[in-house]
Image (tube, rainbow, N blue to C red):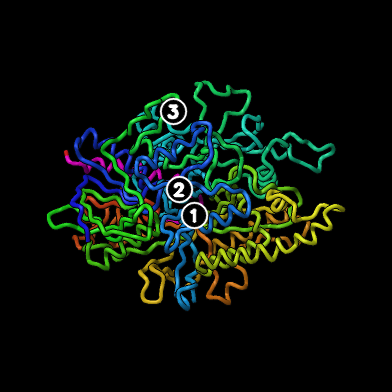
Amino acid sequence: MSDTGRHYQAVVIGSGFGGTMTALPLARAMQEKAPGEKLLMLERGTWWTTPVGTVQDKEVATYRFLSEKGQPVQFWSSAEHFKGFLDIFTRCVRRKGNEDGLYDLTNFGKLGFLRLRLRQNDGVTILRASGVGGGSLVYSNVTIQPPNVVFEDPLWPMTWDRNRYFAMAREAIGFSVLYALTHDEKTKVNTGLSNIATRSARLAPRWLERTDPHSGRPVRFLDPARSDAHATPPDVSNNLWIDRARVFQAEMSGLTHDFGLVDSSINDLPPEPGPFDPKGQPKNYCERQGRCIVGCLPGARHTLNKQLMRAVLGGPPSKLHPEGTPPLFPNMHLEALAEVEIVKKRQGGGWEVHYLKRDHAEPKRTERRVVTANQVILAAGCVGTSEILLRSKKAGSIPGLSDQLGFGFSTNGDYIGFLDGTRERVSLTRGPITTSFAHFNATSGGGGDPAKFHTVEDNGIPRALSSVTGHGMKLLQSLSRGRRTRLFTLYAIFRYATGRVLRYVPSLFRNYRERQEQFASEDEYTDNIMCVVGMGREQAQGRFRLGGRGETPLRVRRDDGKQFLDDPIYAEIRATFKEFAKRLSDDPAADFVNPFLGDAADVVGGRSIGLTHPLGGCRMATSAAGGVCDEFGRVFDASSPGGTGLHHGLYVADAARIPTALGVNPSLTIAALALYSSEQIIRDLPA
């Protein structure tokens, strides 16, 4: 084992919303309160950036800048057809031998023959990110505040001014963390949250507005009367809207009054008649390419790697800054391809962080390293943080961890559905991945039941994935069964070849009479398919444990013995999907299909819910009897009287600490909690 002998005031494990929202305020405070002390951020993945010129970076200088700084960096997958699909699954999916991949498809269960697939699935498959910026690299850019009923649950031990920290989180994501702290215009990295409704930027959307009773913020929404295609004559005032947003909101208006455009963490140009560019420094903006989750080629998304690069490395040369810009925090360092194994408490105070450092050129080659710190902030995500602490508990490196460690895992009610054959064209590949939301049972008024609160959102499909949509159900089922990535890719190529390529020969002889399907674009494959995702107040009854021989590294199950899919919220979500399908299709039997839950899944070890918003495992509480950490994320020492003692300098700052399902996208909540925790971490700095 290589002991580097390096010591830091703080080590932050993970660079997603929890890590970034704690690291940047802490680095700023350290410059003032602890000059000379350093902060280290450890990230198991690499840097990712666009391979094409953008408004702000026409020469793709960012990639060269990162490379020259000695940072491992990769390009987003850019091909918009089947080659893009192959690029994603051969280069961008994380697996053994490709540990610098971006997408980590995590399965749980018992392994089958030669570990090629799962023999038994625990019921969930989680897609998580591995890269500088964490979950911000692959999420749908939705910043949404949960309704008040979520925080009224007694499992939330908070004493905070909730709306204040949510407002800070919107500024931290929408502009920058430093702007949220200082309101200095020079610190802005992004142009703020946006409501993207129209087919291109600058078009006037003619939306209506109302006030959100939970946050007090304006909610913009479509006027359904302007989209009534059955009127005589039809009102076509909403024809400039993105088709998916227009159809979703027009039909959802018949099911709930609580719907509208999501606040997107994406730069966009202001709609007319406002000024185009009042400051003369145009920023990257949304070009409606529908590829948010596979990498924004125009560079418009508010991914956290932008803020981290500026903080740690500065910026590349440009016309405005020919010499480049210096880093904001010379006291902050970021080490990519660094995968933490355990955290160890040191005798006499402080912590050791044991991790694997991967070689840039050959990521499967590793070196064991150890650094020490006065403070350690765990922000490796719900799965990562829970696994690190479970390993540390097993190794005995952190004595007195709560017996509640691993408990409280929630699927957040994640559910996805596809409906083929919509009455109107939906144009699934155009626009941001998500444009709109609809809430159900958000309040107790009007006959609502807060226990059944759930959210439904539209969801787009990148063009690179639309080319396999015809075979997508079986492909996604293959992923949920834990099929190895190479086998999955070969399987996809086989299905694509037999389903499409072999049809080209007869198509060539028929095309002169009538255009054949083989010559349709990727956009056309999904014109009449609607994709929606649901989230809801799932009961958070799951529990993580370390896997044993013949098992995945982590296992997960519900404490009540039920399957995750049996949670009551899924019946509510499916019922809403069913009603929505009736409004979208002329087929009375129409319904949304979840590709992870086909009948074939039962034959191969159980149905698996595809998750992108896992929560819990290290939940907050008032003592170690109820959870792993307190409201500030300070980890309990269960061996102390009453279990209220703390492991000084050890914190949890990500989705793992959230004690219940949120029923909405969690990024804004994670950011708000992390900003709240950062104030306590700063108070704990040496005087």
Q: Residue furthest bottom?
A: 113
Say the numbered circle drawn on residue 318.
3
In the picture, residue 333 is in which quadrant? top left
Q: Residue at x 54, y 35 (%)?
A: 194
Give the mark nearest the N terminus, 1 or 2: 2
> What amino acid does circle 2 point to?
Gln
In the image, 665 versus 100, the foreground residue is: 100
Residue 680 belongs to the span the image colors magenta: yes
Question: Badge 2 local density, few (<14 within 10 Å), some, or many (20+)?
Answer: many
> What amino acid does circle 3 point to?
Ser
Question: Badge 1 local density, few (<14 within 10 Å), some, or many (20+)?
Answer: many
- Residue carrying label 1: 92
Q: Residue furthest right?
A: 513
Element class at badge 3? loop
Give the x, y percent position of residue 436: 60, 44
Q: Residue at x 27, y 63 (%)?
A: 392
Q: Which residues are magenta?
A: 658-686
Give the x, y percent position of residue 638: 23, 62
In the image, 50 versus 25, the foreground residue is: 50
In the picture, residue 268 is in which quadrant? top right
Location of residue 508 with respect to 169 vertically, above or below: below
In the image, 592 versus 85, the foreground residue is: 85
Q: Residue at x 35, y 57 (%)?
A: 385
Say the numbered circle drawn on residue 74.
2
> What amino acid does circle 1 point to?
Cys
